[in-house]
Amino acid sequence: MQKNKAIVFAYHTVGVNCLQILLNQGFDIPLVLTHEDAPHENIWFKSVRDLCTEHQIPYLTPTNFDDPDLIAQLTAIDPDYLFSFYYRHMIPSNILGIAKVAALNMHGSLLPKYRGRVPINWAVLHGETKTGATLHVMEAKPDAGDIVHQKSVPILPDETAYEVFLKVAEIAAITLEEVVPDLLEGNVPRRPNRLQEGSYFGGRTPEDGRIDWQQSAQNIYNLVRAVAPPYPGAFTEIQGKQLIVNKAMLASLPNRLINSRLGLDVVDNRIYGFCGDERALLISQLVHDGKEVSAAELQQILLQATKE
């Protein structure tokens, strides 16, 4: 008898991709739990609610897992599996225990590395050359359970976190699809998730995108890549103006910039960032208040700053 009844907690593009795999492979999904979109968030990703509507799957957007009616509803379903695909809340142990076979989560890193929040952004920020997706057993501790299956993707030197995310979203679906035949038989492959060999990182805020020009050019470039659009962006401030570096590349240091102070400067009608290791970034898109700042406009801002 197939073990194919599942409650799915899902959000974001990975949630859509993995939920679609379960549907394609014949899972019975009587209920999906997802999130209401945050009113001030840039919603650039796929919608789980839209997929549920398309397939006429009932869904809830709970905010309180202590609700006895919700727990009773989940328990009554008597699922073989619980799946969590980019769901943003920790699922408590009493709900994880509802699954008769296993509760499984898809995480956007090669566990045990980069447990915790926004793992792709952290991986790009730290200059990693690969990451991936890991399906693992859920425990009360985040991203700590046994590894069921994982697959990797490369991080190229100039890729942004968004570009890496698109690859991880695809490989997450493949990771799940490859293990589905075992899951349908009630078999959950497991190997230890050796936490002592990995790392844990918390969430990031827009303020974490502030550029420290004392850092090396490579570190600053990694920050630009890690938080480039659709994320909030790496920024610096001049004259009270927040200037966001949307696009840049590592560059040779122009001779005329050698004696410049750290930070932004204009040379030969090009915008450069002068970094702490006497190297530079060539900035191809600088934005203030949603509008692109030209080299001439930046020069005026810098001129005004020197007068004060």
Image (cartoon, helix red, strand yellow):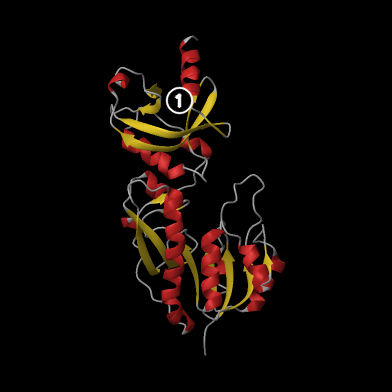
The quadrant where residue 257 appears = top left
User: In this figure, what is the number of numbered marks?
Assistant: 1
Q: Residue at x 55, y 70 (%)?
A: 19
Indicate whether 42 appears above or below 93: above
User: In the depicted view, which residue is nearer to us: 264 or 9?
Assistant: 264
| Residue lying furthest top | 307
Residue at image mark 1: 295
The quadrant where residue 10 appears = bottom right
User: In the depicted view, which residue is nearer to us: 232 or 140?
Assistant: 232
Query: From the viewer's perspective, is 239 left or right of 62?
Result: left
Indicate whether 154 appears above or below 208: below
Q: Does residue 50 appear anywhere in the picture?
A: yes
Query: How far across and down, in percent of the image, does residue 136 sit?
Result: 43, 67
| Residue lying furthest right | 69
Query: How far across and down, in percent of the image, does residue 203 sit?
Result: 49, 46
Query: From the viewer's perspective, is 300 left or right of 69?
Result: left
Query: From the viewer's perspective, is 10 left or right of 174?
Result: right
| Pointer 1 local density, CA inside 10 Å: few below 14, some 14–19, many at least 20 | many
Q: Does residue 86 appear anywhere in the picture?
A: no
Q: Which residue is drawn at 39% across and 76% down?
A: 189
Indicate whether 280 appears above or below 306: below
User: In the depicted view, which residue is nearer to us: 217 or 146?
Assistant: 217
Query: How far across and down, in percent of the image, does residue 63 sit?
Result: 67, 57
| Residue lying furthest bottom | 1
Query: How far across and down, in percent of the image, does residue 39 sit?
Result: 67, 47
Q: Residue at x 55, y 81 (%)?
A: 26
Element on which disc 1 rests: helix
Indicate whether 230 appears above or below 269: below
Q: What residue type is labelled 1?
A: Ala
